[in-house]
Image (spheres, rainbow, N blue to C red):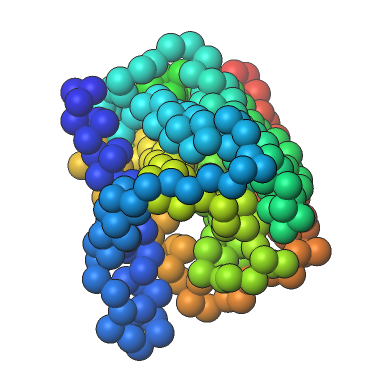
Amino acid sequence: MALLNTLLLLLAALCIPGLINRTRARLAGRKGIRFAQHLYDVRLLLRKGAVYSPTTSALFRTAPSVILATSLLAALFIPVGDLRPLFSFDGDLVAFAYLLALGRGALILAAMDTGSSFEGMGASREALYGALVEPALMLTFGTLALISGHTSFVSIFEADATGDAKLIVVLLLAAYVLTKIVFTESGRVPVDDPRTHLELTMIHEVMCLDYCGVDLAWIKIATWLKSAALSMLAADAVAAAVCPRWWFAAPLAVLLTGLSVGIVESTQARNKLVRNTTFILTITALAALVFFTGYLLQLNIGLQ
């Protein structure tokens, strides 16, 4: 069961970027690149060696491995529907959030280690947006823990809530917030645009300018894993409310992020940097509203 859970999560991580590219191409009326083009690009990067600036230290060289390790370990906490993940314990939702924060911190420090002013600007933006979006993530986790009475992802999503209208509403709202968080954590429009090459407007991409070869491949794979983990959490919340089975949650995670990100990137422009803080704070406010709603419904449930 744990092996199937891990395989499905890895498969989702590989499929989401391809679906985003295909969705964006179709909506633009183009043939577009092939579905697995991102895998071929990473394969080419894995064949290349890494080049390091003499101004960088060992921190810059070890950061890609830390980022990949934290993203992979965080993903191994996520269940797929009714399957059990490889790792699970009480409080693993807190460990998940801290692992993502550790990977972000490693990338920020590596960008600052280069001494580049451009990468320093990207690092400062990433630190700001990370500090703003983490309360939304923790509030969403708090909502899930509140309505379920558990602090483990497995225990939270193993309960069948399909017959309780109140829990269904909270779970669907939490899934919506998690889907919005994916846009920020994965550096997608409207917060960031991975296709841009203007250093003054980039956030995530500018921090990777000095990386190449296998190091850049690790960072790209880590981004896929982080997006897949958050997408699977949103899909698990929807599945718990509709159909708590792995064969429903796994494709739903791919469709939620693949279609939503592809549609948004085809219909919206990237926000101005001054508007990104408002966008992320809106997500945090929505997460707080969902938490408050779950708290009120939980009180009502307890009184009954």
Q: Quadrant of residue 16?
A: bottom left
Q: In this figure, what is the number of numbered marks? A: 0
Residue at the limit of the structure toward the top, as seen here: 90
User: Which residue occupies 28% across, 83% down?
Assistant: 31
Residue 2 position in % (x across, y down): 23, 23
Q: Which residue in the rendered view is the most extreme toward the right?
A: 274
Q: Nearer the viewer, residue 169 or 1?
A: 1
Q: Is residue 2 left or right of residue 221?
A: left
- Location of residue 304 in the rendering, given as x and y in whole percent from the top left corner: 57, 21
Q: Is residue 169 visible?
A: no
Residue 274 visible in rendering: yes
Q: Residue furthest bottom?
A: 29
Q: Quadrant of the N terminus?
A: top left
**Viewer-side residue, 255 vs 221:** 221
Between 294 and 201, the residue placed more toward the observer is 201
Q: Is residue 23 above or below residue 162?
A: below
Image height check: is 262 above or below 25?
Answer: above
* Left or right side of 197 for 74: left
From the top left corner, tell me how far across and down residue 19 is, in percent.
32, 63
Name the foreground residue: 64 vs 24: 64
The percent coordinates of residue 184 (x first, y second) are 60, 52
Q: Residue at x 42, y 56 (%)?
A: 257
Q: Residue at horizontal 48%, vertical 77%?
A: 266
User: Residue placed at 31% from the left, 48% from the top?
Assistant: 46
